[in-house]
Image (tube, rainbow, N blue to C red):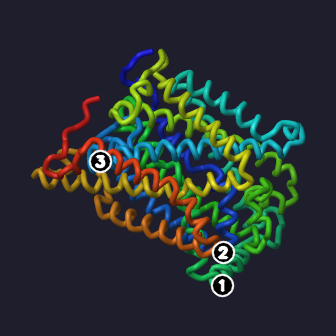
Amino acid sequence: MADSKMERKLQARHISMIAIGGCIGTGLFMASGAVVSKAGSYGAVLTYALIGVIIYFLMASIGELATFYPVSGSFGAYATRFIDPGVGFGVGWLFWILWILVASVDIITLSKILHYWEFFRQFSTFSICIIFLVLLYLLNLISVKVFGEVEYWITIIKVMTVVAFLIVGVAIVFGATGNSEAGIHTFIQNGEKTSSTGMLGLFGVLSTAAFSFGGTEVVAVTAGESPNPKETMPKAVKQVFWRILIFYIATMLIISSIVSANDPRLLDTNNVTASPFTIVFQNIGLEVAAVIMNAVILTSVLSAANSGMYVSSRQLFSLSSHNYGPKVFKKLNTNSVPVFALTFSAVYMVLCFIFERLNPSGYYMLLSMVGIIVMIIWMVSLISQIRLRRAIMKQGKKAEDVLPYTAKTGVVGSYIALISFATIILLQLIADYATGGFVKMSYNLVCPAIGVVMYIVFKMVTKKKFVKLEEMDIHPYKG
């Protein structure tokens, strides 16, 4: 064991694919159908286009931060250096909680998907969860390069699946299969659903669309293990945005042109065959699609869980490196992997599995906590970038002279994204209260409340002050 810096073994292709793979998952394969059903064709396309633009502003901001300060476990480190050490402490641990929840939910989802095949029904979901947790633990224990390679090839499978779906979908829309129900007329017909649901319908799916892009920010975490973040980060940011935006909007167009927005299968999210990808193939008589898509979704969820274990361990490493966590978490093995941080994260995932098994609604309680945390962390990163820019100006320097990469959208895009995410969170809380009362709304507030408590305790114990713009360290990172 060694207490040292991580080796930079992730290549540009790894980083680009990790970011793409992070948000091509169950949000696209499963939740996209629910968006079409609730908001209609016009609403679905408009929603994903709108969120896609906001995500671009976010990614541009994150790219600026990641090139200027390329460290593992980025978001807590950004807040510490550019906002307040207390915010960095609270957000740092909140980010770890987020990825523990994400990885746990993905592994639980994976166990449920496996029950699609009769052979796996002889095993409980809990035992399947433990088996896959051990598998992913060993995979992450080997080397970050192995992790990068696995993510690279799994993401290629996901991308190829989406591309194949789009090609087949276009062929169906233009009559290649002779399906008279598919075409532009179906897209226009589904647009009536948008009119009937109105603004309330759009508000209801905004958060779903935003959550679907969750994982894009992982590209910043990989900066700490990239050999040349000044080149790889800006490139990854640009590629990820355009590919993801095209994938999502094109998928919405295809689904809305083939499947009726009133199809009850689109809202049956407990059934893997409810994936609009599966429904499209079933509608042209290809029943084997259910099996194929189940395997692809399985791979997708496995990839997301793998990313969750990676990010959670790196976040603990970062917290320890900044003296915000036990020193043992920054111990690395011979493969430059923070083994104690990885093990600690795995233990808490087991606790999530136990919680889900003992609580009938445990799965949905874990799931409901994820979305709000994601957007809070996005907002903190945006504030970090805005304050960095303000500090550079305050200290009489130009952004172009200080930053290796400057976002084309500057701080204007960051402000737009910041206000947008705050609005979406507010609308989500209002919607939860309206449909399930205070109890349902409280699930989304538990983790943010933990972050606030940690911030207050940190400030009381350390007495560290808010970072003043004129005193902020704006010198390039020497790592």
State the residue at coordinates (41%, 38%). 73
Examine the rendering and report whether any part of residue 105 can be seen.
Answer: yes
Tags 1 and 3 touching, CB below 8 Å = no
Residue type at tag 1: Ser
Instruction: Name which of mark 1 and mark 3 comes first in the sequence.
Output: 1
Q: Which mark is residue 459?
A: 3
Q: What residue lies at 74% left-to-right and 66% top-to-bottom?
A: 267
Q: Amino acid at mark 3?
A: Lys
Residue matched to label 1? 196
Relative to 371, is 224 above or below?
Answer: above
Q: CA distance from mark 1 to mark 2?
A: 9 Å
Expressed as whole percent of the image width and height from the top left, the position of residue 287 reads 87, 53
* Mark 1 and mark 3: Cα distance apart in space: 50 Å
Q: Earlier in the sequence, mark 3 or mark 2?
A: 2
Q: Which residue is mark 2?
A: 40
Residue 303: x and y in percent read: 62, 39
Q: Nearer the viewer, residue 390 or 447?
A: 447
Q: CA distance from mark 3 to mark 2?
A: 48 Å
In the image, 404 versus 381, the foreground residue is 381
Number of the front mark, 1 or 3: 3
Along the line of sight, the residue nearer the viewer: 399 or 107: 107
- Give the residue furthest to the left: 396
